[in-house]
Amino acid sequence: MKECKHCSTLFHSDQPHALYCSKTCKQRESGQRKYKRRIQREPTYNKKRYLANRESILAKAKIYRQRPEVKARAKLRQAEYEETKRLIRVQWRAEIKNHPCADCGIKYPHPAMDWHHPNGDGGKFKFNRRSKADVLKEIEEKNCVLLCANCHRLRHARGLQQ
């Protein structure tokens, strides 16, 4: 074990002539690297500055947001975000419908599966801006049954409400 010439900490080195524990200690000892002192500000400095200059800060931000390249970037980010959310909704809608038909027992792709409302309250499930848990809760509350499109049409044609 060796002792660092700069900070006096003990260190292990494979080099027999090592005098410093790190490059930083070596640079500080030789004067190549200076200690950086950070300005100590009170915790509410940024809030006070914002409140004092609020109007000019908001005006600059408004001007910045009106620039065409900034608008284009924001529009692109929004489109990417909406597309990602849409793909997530499509994916979990497919997961919810990934079961066989309650009548015939055949498992079809999710676009061919429908929710049947046996109580006659009807309606569609609105997946937009709703969590998966909310939709599953509504399915359970209304006692909905997952049917393939053929069986669903037959149930309505016969007037069967099971």
Image (spheres, rainbow, N blue to C red):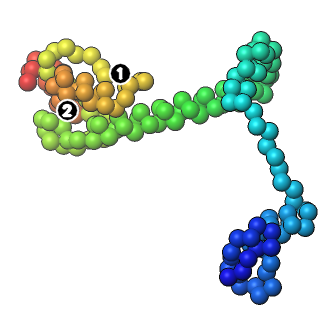
Relative vertical location of residue 33 with respect to residue 65 in this rendering, above or below: below
Instruction: Identify the residue at image location x=47%, y=36%.
Output: 87
Instruction: Identify the residue at image location x=86%, y=67%.
Output: 29
Relative to 26, 73 lies left or right = left
Counting from the top left corner in percent of width and height, residue 54 is at 75, 15
Q: Say which residue label 2 marks.
A: 147
Question: In which image quadrant can residue 31 be found?
Answer: bottom right
Counting from the top left corner in percent of width and height, residue 161 is at 9, 20
Q: Quadrant of the N terminus?
A: bottom right
Q: Is residue 61 visible?
A: no
Label 2, residues with CA under 10 Å away: few <14, some 14-19, many ≥20: many
Looking at the rendered image, the disc whose residue lies closer to the viewer, 2 or 1, is: 1
Q: Name the disc covering residue 82, or none.
A: none
**Helix, strand or loop status at disc 2:** strand
Instruction: Identify the residue at image location x=27%, y=16%.
Output: 123
Q: Is residue 41 visible?
A: yes
Q: Quadrant of the C terminus?
A: top left
Label located before the other in sequence (2 or 1): 1
Residue lying farthest right? 31
Q: Label 2 amino acid?
A: Leu
Relative to 118, 108 lies left or right = right
Q: Nearer the viewer, residue 114 or 63?
A: 63
Q: Say which residue label 1 marks.
A: 126
Counting from the top left corner in percent of width and height, residue 90 is at 41, 35
Question: In which image quadrant can residue 132 be found?
Answer: top left
